[in-house]
Amino acid sequence: MVFSSLIFLFSYLPFLLIGNYLWRNRKWQNILLFGGSLYFYAWGEGERVLIMLASIIINYFIGRAIGSAKESRKKRSYLTFGIIINIGVLVYFKYAYFFVENLNLLLDYIGTDILLYIKKERLPIGISFYTFQSISYLIDVYRKENKAQRNFIDVGLYISLFPQLIAGPIVRYHDIAHQLEHRKSSVEKFSEGVRRFIIGLGKKVLIANNVAYTVDEIFALGPAEMTTPLAWMAITGYAIQIYFDFSGYSDMAIGLGKMFGFDILENFNYPYISKSIKEFWKRWHISLSNWFMDYLYIPLGGNRGSKFKTYRNLVLVFLITGFWHGASWSYVFWGLYHGMFIVFEKLGLEKALERLGKPVQHLYFFIVIMFSWVFFKLEDFSYSLQTASCMLGFSAEGSGFFTVSMFSTPLFWTVYVIGVITSVPVLTGIQKHAFIVARKPSKVISIVFYMCIFFLCTISLVNSTYNPFIYFRF
């Protein structure tokens, strides 16, 4: 079940909202949301909900063990055990086949007759997200930022809360622990949540989906069949798609959280206005950046040691960030690519670009990020390299048969332009001054505006079955 589906919008969500507001007791609300979140996950994953349920049970008892241990050594042992269990499950489902496949290639290369076999498991949706949240809970208890939760339902609700369960944002335990028992609901907060959800739904259904269809058609071609302009059309279209797909999902998650009384932290802040890759990661997937900062970069030493150690830590963190996204060499390269550019910026590139002015900084960022999306979009590393060559016009690729005009439609270019305009904060000032009229008429106009977006989304969902979510595969 996805947020942008008719079954969610007109069946699941209304049922859960009604139940949540009929049961004003916080304990019963948490039970309802926990059960509803398990049902939400089981709808698409079936018996694989048991994997998540096992994770909740294990982390609940390990958290209790960490909290009750008197000796630091025991606390560290319990924490280490918990992290190994969580990462072990993630590695088995997400990376085991990749490791064995590459080990077999190595064994074949050195001339041995050994061949290893492992079944390729289907990746449980959202396992990367709820694994990181489980680890966050254990570490926060170990650091004494929060007490070990004695209520099993509250631990289960934190790990499985359906708004951010399968595609984030990644919610750190210390950011939401208090809200599990003491969150506040109000008409104003609920209304804000509805507005935020509708905006996210519009981003996803009206922009991301309409751009994605053409982008996927183009990338279905081989690089040799593309012209260089067509390759740029595809990758800039993909940049629009992934931003509105993921930020739209985050908006919906944040909006749903507010409807149920939760305040989930922001996950995007106009990343495409960045002037550097460093700035980009302060604006893109903020929850992931914060997670790696708190639980990996700082424990590694952060920037407290020599410059070499700082650069090493940065590259290592981004290498793991790339690998977290998927078991392929394209993702590994994508992570290293970002890490190396951040190192280059720290070595003086950023200051040099500042002297050249903002237009040059934005151009630098645009070129770097567009090439990075090639390796993020295409999991086949050789295909990624060929497509990048096509974009540069450095090889036989870029002189193919298929041209921009063959994929141009009024709908694609209309949505493309809207996507470009709304991906930067040029409308912020307009929104602030849009209703320079009496208070009541402005509210009416606002209500009509959101109703129109919801109506258009509903019509689109009724008439189309094309509704992919990029981050579901992570």
Image: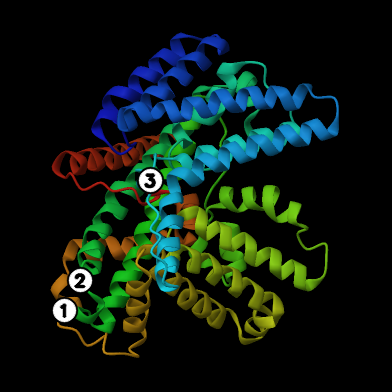
Q: Please give left or right for residue 158 compared with residue 79 in the image.
A: left
Q: CA distance from mark 3 to mark 1?
A: 30 Å
Specify the amino acid type for callout 2: Leu
**Residue 167 x, y percent position in the rendering:** 44, 43
**Residue 472, which numbered label?**
3
User: Which residue is labeled 2 in the image?
Assistant: 221
Give the residue at mark 1.
402
Asked whether disc 3 touches disc 1, contact meaning CB atoms under 8 Å apart, the reply is no
Q: Where is 409 relative to 394, above or below? A: above
Closer to the camera, 355 or 429? 355
Residue 94 placement (x, y as % from top left): 44, 48
Separation of residues labelled 1 and 2 (CA atoms): 9 Å
Q: Are marks 1 and 2 in contact (CB under 8 Å)?
A: yes
**Side (left or right) of 88 relative to 97:** right
Q: Which quarter of the figure is the N terminus placed in?
A: top left
- Which one is closest to the eye, mark 1 or mark 2? 2
Name the residue rendered at 30%, 36% in the picture. Answer: 451
| In the image, residue 240 above or below residue 88 | below
Residue at 27% x, 26% y: name it: 10
Quadrant position of residue 456: top left
Residue 345, numbered label: none
Q: Which is nearer the eye, 319 or 291?
A: 319
**Residue 378 against residue 3 in the figure, above or below:** below
> 8 left or right of 339?
left
Residue 171 visible, this angle: no
Disc 3 versus disc 1: nearer the observer:
3
Residue 377 visible to the viewer: yes
Q: Residue at x 67, y 16 (%)?
A: 150
